[in-house]
């Protein structure tokens, strides 16, 4: 202890402290009086906002806000919050002296003297424009990537669907032919039943496909899982080759969840199509949903969850491949067959939803992928 240098602040006089604050250039640091008028100004404030000290001292904080925020009294609102709660934070657009905008991260702290009397407010602002723009570009790229994945998925779905429709039309045409040649009311009735069933299946398929194709925008909402899982099972089930059977198991009604339906559907598609690709020789896929109360047994998750799993009885995943499957662009499939983006979408979706994805796989026995989603109850 005795050898440690004295703390820096211990040796700082009030004057040197003031000089230090004034010299900081990456942050605007200044004081406001309790009414919100500017009292001090540092180099960072000058650099970020473009005003010299003599141009702003005495003026109200609201001069930095865009017109729409000024009309809504945003500056006054922040000051009131800081006075009431001791602190107010905000993130949003601000205006420089030359009229250009920057994205600011701000903290406003109420400052009291030793006797507890309010002296004023300390304001710290950071210019986050670059990071904000990088984030926006990232969101845009992510949305484009999602759209590209979706177009690819739609291609696969419609390919299978043309085949399915052909089968439905064969049923309808065959049954109409027979009905036209029959004069037995009972026989005609049973043929009409067949035609009706085929028609309903066709309608369901197009309905699910159109819903899947039309969904836009990435937004979470409270979601009833039953229709989503049923639609996934009908729509993705029809795109499977002959020897692959998809079975859906819902032991009890799953709790609702709060997720983006677009992303959830895509995650289910990615999991089911991975199982399909693993089942080159044919086999079974089981889509299952169940409610489970977690006590931290998986990734420290706690509370009420819905577990949605996709299992297959394919060849499984070896440990060295398993270590990499969530990496973007990692694929073991031939060029043109895999992009390596499926599981990275599933992973991102699960994380965004404050849940998780779990892989259980044994070479030779098959694979189970389980989505853990927090119940919205
Ligand atoms: N059910 C599964 N059975 C066996 N291997 C799987 C399964 N799901 C995923 N994989 C492995 O994980 C890899 C990455 O999957 P994914 O990210 O969906 O990309 P892609 O399907 O385009 O290859 C696959 O190439 C495959 O090796
Ligand atoms: Mg895939």
Image: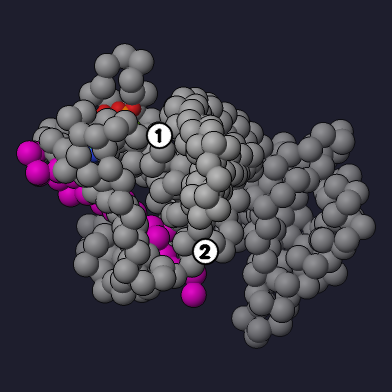
Q: Earlier in the sequence, mark 2 or mark 1?
A: 2
Residue 366 included in the magenta stretch of the image: yes
Boundaries of the magenta span:
354-377
Residue at left offset 78%, top offset 62%: 32
How many numbered marks, from 0 up?
2
Q: Nearer the viewer, mark 2 or mark 1?
A: 1
- Position of residue 259 relative to residue 192, above or below, is below
Residue 181 placement, left or right of 308: right
The circle drawn on residue 107 is: none
Residue 316 placement, left or right of 82: left
- Position of residue 49 relative to residue 226, above or below, is above
Residue furthest left in the image: 364
**Label 1 Cα crowd, 10 Å radius (few <14 / some 14-19 / many 20+):** many
The circle drawn on residue 224 is: 2
Position of the N terminus by quadrant: bottom left
The circle drawn on residue 239 is: 1
Q: Residue 33: tell me if it is visible.
A: no
Q: CA distance from mark 2 to mark 1?
A: 24 Å
- Position of residue 373 relative to residue 218, above or below, is below
Q: Nearer the viewer, residue 201 or 47?
A: 201
Secondary structure type for disc 2: loop
**Label 2 Cα crowd, 10 Å radius (few <14 / some 14-19 / many 20+):** some
Secondary structure type for disc 1: loop
Residue at left offset 33%, top offset 55%: 248
Percent position of residue 221, x then y: 58, 59
- Position of residue 215 relative to residue 35, above or below, is above
């Amino acid at each position: 202890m005795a050898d440690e240098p004295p703390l820096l602040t211990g040796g700082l006089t009030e004057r040197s402290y003031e000089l230090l604050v004034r010299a900081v250039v990456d942050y605007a640091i200044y004081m406001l009086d309790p009414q919100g008028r500017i009292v001090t100004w540092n180099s960072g404030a000058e650099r970020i906002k473009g005003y010299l000290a003599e141009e702003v001292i005495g003026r109200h904080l609201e001069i930095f806000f865009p017109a729409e925020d000024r009309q809504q009294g945003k500056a006054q609102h922040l000051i009131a919050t800081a006075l009431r709660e001791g602190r107010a934070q905000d993130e949003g657009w601000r205006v420089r002296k030359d009229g250009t905008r920057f994205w600011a991260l701000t903290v406003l702290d109420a400052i009291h003297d030793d006797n507890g009397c309010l002296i004023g407010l300390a304001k710290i602002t950071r210019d986050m424009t670059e990071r904000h723009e990088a984030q926006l570009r990232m969101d845009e790229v992510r949305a484009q990537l999602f759209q590209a994945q979706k177009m690819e998925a739609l291609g696969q779905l419609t390919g299978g669907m043309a085949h399915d429709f052909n089968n439905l039309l064969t049923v309808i045409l065959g049954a109409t032919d027979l009905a036209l040649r029959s004069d037995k009311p009972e026989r005609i009735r049973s043929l009409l039943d067949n035609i009706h069933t085929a028609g309903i299946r066709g309608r369901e398929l197009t309905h699910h496909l159109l819903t899947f194709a039309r969904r836009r925008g990435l937004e979470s909402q409270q979601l009833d899982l039953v229709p989503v899982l049923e639609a996934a099972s009908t729509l993705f089930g029809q795109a499977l080759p002959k020897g692959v059977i998809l079975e859906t198991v819902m032991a009890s009604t799953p709790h609702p969840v709060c997720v983006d339906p677009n992303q959830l559907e895509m995650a289910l598609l990615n999991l089911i199509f991975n199982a399909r690709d693993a089942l080159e020789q044919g086999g079974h896929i089981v889509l299952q949903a169940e409610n489970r109360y977690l006590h931290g047994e998986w990734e420290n998750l706690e509370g009420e969850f819905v577990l949605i799993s996709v299992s297959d009885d394919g060849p499984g995943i070896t440990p060295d491949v398993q270590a990499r499957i969530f990496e973007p662009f990692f694929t073991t499939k031939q060029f043109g067959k895999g992009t390596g983006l499926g599981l990275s979408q599933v992973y991102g979706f699960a994380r965004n939803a404050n849940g998780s994805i779990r892989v259980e796989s044994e070479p030779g026995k098959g694979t189970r992928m389980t989505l853990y989603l927090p119940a919205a109850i």
